[in-house]
Amino acid sequence: MIVSLECKKLKRTGFKAAFFGGGILAAAVPALNMAFRSEAYLSMDAPPVKILLNANWQMMAMLNVLLIVAGACILYHIEYADHAIRKMRTLPFSESAVFFGKTAVLVSACILLLAIEAASIFGCSVHWFGPAAGLYREILKNFGFFLLLMLPAILLSLAAASVCRNMWTALGTGVVCVFAATMIPAQNFALSLFPFALPFRTFSDLSGSAARNYAIAGAAETVGAAALAILILKIRRSFE
């Protein structure tokens, strides 16, 4: 019920259009790259999905994380606009339930985003490299991995947006975190565990043990971010 209410609140906010348009923009990155530079990639001796993700995922991931930050700000801006959050507190819902309802909406939007991008990677693989055995499985593994590593950034972006009454404060904080993440060296495992840097990692470019370590870190950070969000909501409520 809460998720349904959250979806109704999104009317006339541009949230759905932003994620759909962002997905199309991110999906265009590998297609355009292959259209103009196909010779450079066709000569590489590696699986098609790995070639395409290594060449394009950094830009695609940046667009994804920026959309996560913007989407989180939109989801909480509709509560702070015209003091709607005060009216919400009179309803029989806990703030943590509302928070996780918004989390479900944002995760669903990210699944749509990743589905559009996966379709683009699949189309580019088939068009330029030809059909390959296990292509579906390889794409599903990579994009499932991406979704897992996005979860900490989703929860932390929503937590920041829930604290900041001014949407631009939360948006600016998120953008700073995204650009800080792009400067973290990928070979430094400890630093690359920064929640906003995790979505830049690719499953196909990691060894089995490294991919497992990142998956465990992503799951642990998701649980930690959820606990932190609940704590923030309780502390904020006690000071209001």
Image (cartoon, rainbow, N blue to C red):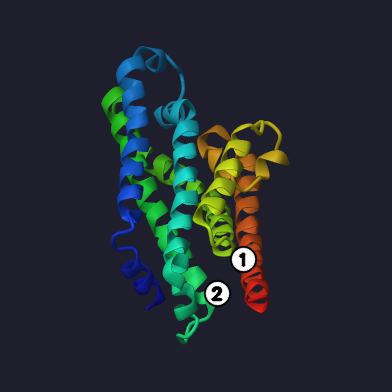
The secondary structure type at the circle numbered 2 is: helix
Number of numbered discs on residues: 2
Q: Residue at x 32, y 28 (%)?
A: 31
Label 2 to label 1, Cα distance in Å?
Answer: 8 Å
> Measured from the top left, where is residue 27 in percent x and y?
34, 36
> Measured from the top left, where is residue 234 in percent x and y?
65, 75
Under mark 1, the amino acid is: Ala
Query: In the figure, is residue 199 to the left or right of 15?
Result: right
Under mark 2, the amino acid is: Ser
The label shown at residue 109 is: none
Check disc 2: other Cα within 10 Å, few if <14, some if 14-19, many if 20+.
some
Q: Is residue 28 above or below residue 110?
A: above
Q: Badge 2 is on which residue?
A: 96
Q: Badge 1 is on which residue?
A: 229
> Measured from the top left, where is residue 163 in percent x and y?
59, 63
Question: CB under 8 Å between callouts 2 and 1?
Answer: yes
The secondary structure type at the circle numbered 1 is: helix
Q: Is residue 221 above or below residue 33?
A: below
